[in-house]
Image (cartoon, rainbow, N blue to C red):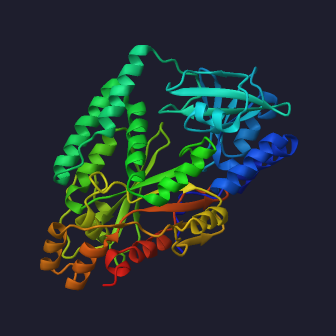
Amino acid sequence: MQVDERWPRCPDAAEWFNTRMHDLRRLSPTLDQFGNRLLEHSGVELTALVDHWKLPLAEFPASLGGQLGMEPAETDCGIQWCHPGASVPDVLVGPAVMTMPVLRVESIRDFRDSTGWAVVGGAGDDDSGYAEAQFVLDGHAVGVAVRQGQKCCCPGRVTSEFRERLAHARELLSSRDRTGTDVQIISRAQVVSSQVTALLGRDRAADEFFRAERDYYMSRNNAASFQYRLQQDAGIGWANHDHHTYRSARSEFWLLMKLFTSMGFYCREKFFAGAEAGWGAQVMEHPVSRVVLFCDVDMATEDLEVDFDTVELKQLSTLKTIGLWCALHGSSIGVAGMHHLEAVFNFERATHIMVEAGYGIMPAFTDLPMLKQAFTNPELWQVSPERARPLLESGAITREQANSFTRSGAAGSHLEILQRWDGYRGFNKTGVSSIIKATDARTLDGG
């Protein structure tokens, strides 16, 4: 299997954080019981939720940060150490900092109501950029935090006027018009994004945009909606999301890239599995909101030298998997919604839960020491005759396939089950290529 070598495995850093959590769970039966329930009920590992550790300087000297490959940055609330290449927690160091892990959740209130733990301290207002609550479990401090478009750990403040702007922004996002041509849809999305940015600022606007996108996606994917309910039972929401996957036709791909770059995303890396695969992706990352995008498109070798956000891609002679999906269902930025949301789990437990609940799991397309991935079986979405007819006339699908798609539906969206080890942040090119082929509507639906 071919993996992206630009992202290193960082076993020493990952093990250091895992050991700290293991030791704390041994000292706190309450935290350990919560971690066990979380895993058993939802398939999520407690370590996947650790946003950062708060540690006094004596427990995290600069020499240790350097040894773990982390880099320091000064903030108003202390020195924040981050790893530039690994998926491990940050560390906030300060002279008056209390030792504790801080878990990432989507709502402090939901988490408190779910656990029944008594809040003993905290900082930051609900719906501010950063809010935190603190608990004492068996004599040991544990925090939970909501981070909304803010990288540092400084508490946020919210005025009544900001709450009105936030409510207006969320209404704009939830009611975004997804109908029409891709050009019209992206143009309207750009207008909405600009309006929300004016109301909330760029980083918070990006965070809110994809919060609304996850909600829309769940309205069209039963497996994801089921999994979300399990995670909400634990009060964590989608705090474990890894990346959001969008599919686009070639001709509008550059407009989609411009939309995302206007939100502050940068092009992290191109992903091309080879000419025989017929597809590729632009991986984008937001430097503040922790949202990662995997943007799929039918792709040829010559596209490797193209700046996707400035050049309109020429049509290929045939529709590959991504182009066909968009032709059958619409683009992800439009009515189709995301192709899949990928979240971080304990792979074995999460897949077992899905199968027991009646949601099938496709064969794992990555099974490596540092990465394992699989899709749930696809949701079948009805295809309108108006979409199937031109595809039949062009020879992109057969008559049998057209009849099947309009009668029984074609492969739509998935939830992706992922587990990472050693802090690995990359992807498996060969494995992703195989699953792209395996999820082609013509393969899945009997053509």
Relative to 115, residue 157 above or below: above
Q: Is residue 399 visible?
A: yes
Q: Position of residue 304 (x, y in %)?
A: 32, 64
Relative to 164, residue 390 above or below: below
Q: Position of residue 388 (x, y in %)?
A: 19, 72
Question: How many marks are shown on the rendered structure?
Answer: 0
In the rendered structure, the answer to whether residue 1 lies left or right of residue 327 reads right
Relative to 171, residue 328 above or below: below
Towards the viewer: 203 or 195: 195
In the rendered image, which quarter is residue 306 located in? Answer: bottom left
In the rendered structure, the answer to whether residue 35 lies left or right of residue 424 reads right
Towards the viewer: 79 or 403: 403
Q: Residue at x 27, y 54 (%)?
A: 335
In the rendered structure, the answer to whether residue 119 lies left or right of residue 380 reads right
Quarter of the figure with the C terminus? bottom left
Q: Residue at x 54, y 68 (%)?
A: 358
Q: Residue at x 61, y 49 (%)?
A: 87
Towards the viewer: 212 or 316: 212
Q: Position of residue 106 (x, y in %)?
A: 55, 38
In the rendered image, which quarter is residue 443 located in? Answer: bottom left
Q: Is residue 200 visible?
A: no
Q: Residue at x 26, y 35 (%)?
A: 192
Quarter of the figure with the N terminus? bottom right
Q: Position of residue 259 (x, y in %)?
A: 28, 44
